[in-house]
Amino acid sequence: MLTLLSMFYYICLRRRSRSGTRGEALTSRRAVESGQRAILPVSVEVEQYTKEVLDFSSHYGSENSMSYTMWNLAGVPNVYPSSGDFTQTAVFRTYGTWWEQCASAPPRFRRTPKDFYSLDYIELGFEEPVYPTAVEVLETYYPGAIVQILACSHNPFSQNQPTDVRWEVLWAGEPTKVLAPQARQFSPTIKHISFPTNLLRLEVNSSLLDYYTELDAVILRGVKERPMLALYKMPVIDMIDLSDSEEDLSDLGGPFRQGPDCRTGNGYFDKLPYELIQLILSHLTLPDLCRLAQSCKMLHQHCCDPLQYTQLSLQPYWARLSDTSLGYLQSRCTRLQRLNLSWTGNRGALTLNSFSSFMKVCGLSLVRLELSCCHFLNEACLEVLAQACPGLQELNLASCDRLHPQAFTHISKLTRLRRLVLYRTKIEQTAILSILTFCIELKHLNLGSCIRIEDYDVVASMLAARCHSLCSLDLWRCRNLTDRGLNELVSGCRMLEELDLGWSPTLQSSTGCFQHLARSLPRLRKLFLTANRTVRDSDIEELASCCPLLQHLDILGTRLVSAASLKKLLQSCPQLRLLDVSFCSQIDTRLAQELSSLFPSVAIKRSFTH
């Protein structure tokens, strides 16, 4: 009990020291004692729309167009106050929970904080740094996805190298499901911060939504002079102040202090079996584990045990992770098997030296590595990975769009890879062919929006020849796959359960390629033929006959599919859970509602435009 009280008192002291400087406290105390109120400076509020979209994790649109891309968030509104599905808005890649139910979805990391909801993000730059007074997001379709708004101290348009980059949460909340998909202006009450900003970050979670959320514009309101509170109150320590969200990451793996001797004052806790204590500690979040290590020698030993760090997700702490904190964790991760560094290290937070050092020490047992949106990565980093992680089976480089094409050649050395995500990267044909030549155990491959691959038919042919165990393949927006390549692919990769051919304009139903696909893939569970105008009844009927395990089908935009063929599909595929018939000219709202009433277990999506 004494140990726990000592730990609580120590944390309280740290909280109190952070809540205000000594000078501020003395000044405020004099003001309170004299009954005087601080004078509020007069400052005009500035209203700004986004100047530039700086970074984002995903989008529905193409890399070489503006439709449904994040770049639509720059400037004044294009759609608001209208509601509906508009190409001029910003749309993220996924919605709902269907993607978590697919075979290609990896399991969630243990120890992920319960209040970390973010699945996607976008960073926006504004012209003038201001002290924010309000942030307004114009949502035009299926609102409710925003879960966090952050502000950064760094000016993204400054020519100087960023130093001491600081992020502050302006607002945070849980994912919500708004009953109506109509447009709204989302303007939550935000926290006041101590620095001016012209860099905002929106984080979203669309898992509760019935369709894609669409954003039209973001407005930043603020003043150029720092606002002062009318009456400064002395800091009061509250239990709420002890939450993880404000804790410095220096605690997250920092040099642990030696606590009191555990031989006294621990009751019977230290008599528990070592394995049982380890099991109890495995339920703590990473910051809590590191704080507990500072309480006493016995718990320090338990909390530093490498078996507590076989899985490590640092993504929730992306804003505070640095070379120093990664170095602190290094000695405890010698048995690390699964590591999530997604979103971390940007703007100089992580360097090549610290990343390389960590991987050389901790990479030997690594089987899964998540590095999506890690813009600090370069060719040298991938070379280190290839050398230090010989047993790596899963690698995610999604949206690492600043990696040089030559860097991807090193991935071919990871011959045990089974899952590889290269969504929105600059990989070129030579590199992907080299990877497919040597990584023949691949089961899950994502090449969505890889616009630098010149000939997808050649890639499909190589997949058919080398990767017979392939289970899922994402070719979203591949621009030159033809019926020849598709026929080779499905003939050679008959284990495929998921195939995304959305927005692939060179595939034509008249060649019979979709019927051949259905006959060749009896295990098919997910098929996206999004925006292929040529899909017809005969294709749907072949799917109904040959693919009884089908769960997800997207035929958005086709003009040649009737309600009769869809009814046959729904009758023949009892596991079907998602059917997107948006903008299908023969399926109006009435027919979609009729199908929904006949098959209530299926989510039949039909988007609209006002």
Image (spheres, rainbow, N blue to C red):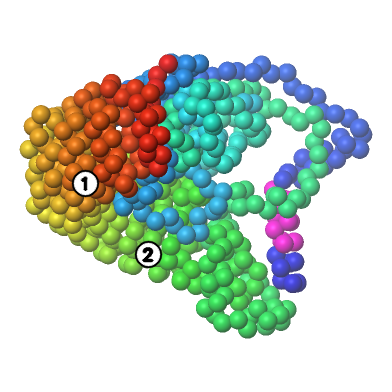
Q: CA distance from mark 2 to mark 1?
A: 36 Å
Residue situated in front as seen by the camera: 453 or 115:
115
Instruction: Name the residue that disc number 1 marks.
Output: 547
At a point 47% along the width and 29% down the height, the residue shown is 142
Mark nearer the viewer, 2 or 1: 1
N-term mark: 2 or 1: 2
Check whether the beta carbons of the residues at disc 2 and disc 1 lie within 8 A of each other. Answer: no
Look at the image and tell me in which quarter the N terminus lies: bottom right
Q: Seen in the image, is 256 located left or right of residue 605?
A: right
Q: Which residues are magenta?
A: 8-18
Residue situated in front as seen by the camera: 561 or 207:
561
Q: Secondary structure at mark 1?
A: loop
Q: Secondary structure at mark 2?
A: loop
Residue 567, by quadrant, is top left
At label 1, which amino acid type do we have? Cys
At a point 75% along the width and 50% down the height, the residue shown is 238
At a point 25% along the width and 57% down the height, the residue shown is 418
Look at the image and tell me in which quarter the C terminus lies: top left
Q: Main secondary structure of the magenta part?
A: helix
Q: Seen in the image, is 339 located left or right of residue 65?
A: right
Residue situated in front as seen by the camera: 249 or 342:
342
At a point 47% along the width and 23% down the height, the residue shown is 140
Whether residue 161 is visible: no
Query: Which mark is on residue 337?
Result: 2
Q: Seen in the image, is 265 located left or right of residue 547?
A: right
Does residue 153 belong to the magenta stretch?
Answer: no
Residue 283, percent across and down? 55, 64
Q: Seen in the image, is 520 located left or right of residue 227?
A: left
Residue situated in front as seen by the camera: 319 or 93:
93
Does residue 13 belong to the magenta stretch?
Answer: yes
Dot 1 crowding, Cα within 10 Å, few <14, some 14–19, many 20+: many
